[in-house]
Image (tube, rainbow, N blue to C red):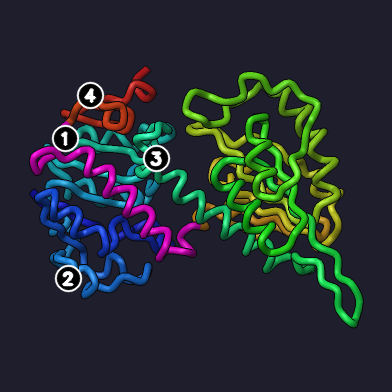
Amino acid sequence: MKVGVAKETFPGEKRVALTPASVPTLKKLGLEVLVQAGAGLVAGYEDSNYVDKGAQIVPTRGDVFGADIVLQVRAAGENPDAGPADLPLMRQGQVLVASCDALSSLPQVEPIAKSGVTLFALELIPRITRAQSMDILSSQATIAGYRAVLMAAMELHKIFPMMMTAAGTLSAAKVFVLGAGVAGLQAIATAKKLGAIVYGYDLRPACREQVESLGGKFVVLELDSGGSEDKGGYAKAMDEAFYQRQREELAKTVAQCDVVITTAAIPGKRSPLLVTAHAVRAMQPGSVVVDLAAQRGGNCELTRADERIVDSGVTILGPTNIVSDAAYHASLMFSNNVTKFLQNLIVDGKPSIRMDDEIIRDTLVTHHGNVVHPRLIS
């Protein structure tokens, strides 16, 4: 059975779904690995690196989609404009494994179902212990949190650490991180390492210990956030009255900080608005907001996806593919996630669609010509 690694077609995407180091593991599963020429080049992986590990380089995209299993970083809703060009290359019984934004992209998923492809959406990996090594949201969020701090540090008109010099003492920058998931915690850790005074907030009270363990100061708001976490560990959407009170309270801390990094996202839903335009305009000129929730509308009222906005002297950045800027390591982590997923999926050298397996059941989006994921057909 053959596994094909396709070159990404989403504009600006530098990652690759499989890195050379993962090839031997797949071969041990009885799989032959085909890699589209140049698929890993912009991520720092040359064709020769794949060949050295036992993969075969194929010249065309059609060759890759001739494989039984195709691996991509982005498919369906994660590549809505260029992705449909691959539909004529797909065939009945083929397996496609990728990040798909499936819960928000039924129009992109349905044509894949009609082609007879069995689609697995990796962003739907359940947050259970057994699946931690397959969790692309966590692995890529680690990169995003790190890069967000570096982006902010480059934009800020100050340096992060306190410095005592012969020319005077420089006070440390204050960084406020909203959302203490994987991206937020990584942002807190990175900002702290750079010497900033770091504050963290999450509507889930259980996150306080994690923020403080990284050296951050947890911001406590006088709000009732009971039931703010779902069974998968993700933040749940709250009602608008709650968010209104939350925005009013958060504005007090936002105004005191030099950098605000927002990371609050609800799977399959619009990002909650946490930082109002009024709150941004209360910040000192030269301050920076980096909104990692920009792809789903943003946590900041002034955010525009993939744009650099300056309002009242404050710079607001809304990157939607920040992980691609660290494509080498982002690809390495993504590849490890995919490989672990395939190790669970492949039995006796071929995919085994076992609906009693929570990982397979929760990520299976299309099968036998139909959209089958319950959250898309309910």
Check if mark 4's residue and mark 1's residue have beta carbons within 8 Å.
no
Q: Which mark is residue 355?
A: 4
Q: Reply yes or no: does residue 217 show up in magenta.
A: no
Q: Which labelled disc corresponds to residue 362? A: none
What residue type is disc 1 on?
Gly
Q: CA distance from mark 4 to mark 3?
A: 19 Å
Q: Secondary structure at mark 4?
A: loop
The answer to whether residue 324 is magenta is yes
Please report the residue visible at 31 percent of the width from the left and 35 percent of the height from the top: 109
Residue 51's label in the rendered image is 2
The answer for how far apart the CA atoms under marks 2 and 3 are is 29 Å
Which circle marks residue 132 in the picture?
3
- First-in-chain label (4 vs 2): 2
State whether residue 299 appears in this view: no
The tag earlier along the polypeptide, 2 or 1, is 2
Please state the extent of the stretch shown in magenta in the rendering.
323-352
Q: Amino acid at mark 4?
A: Met
Q: Quadrant of the C terminus?
A: top left
Residue 85 left/right relative to 289: left
**Above or below, 21 relative to 246:** below
Identify which amino acid the numbered label 3 is placed on: Gln
In this rendering, position of residue 25 left or right of residue 44:
left
Identify the residue position indicated by label 1 in the image. 116
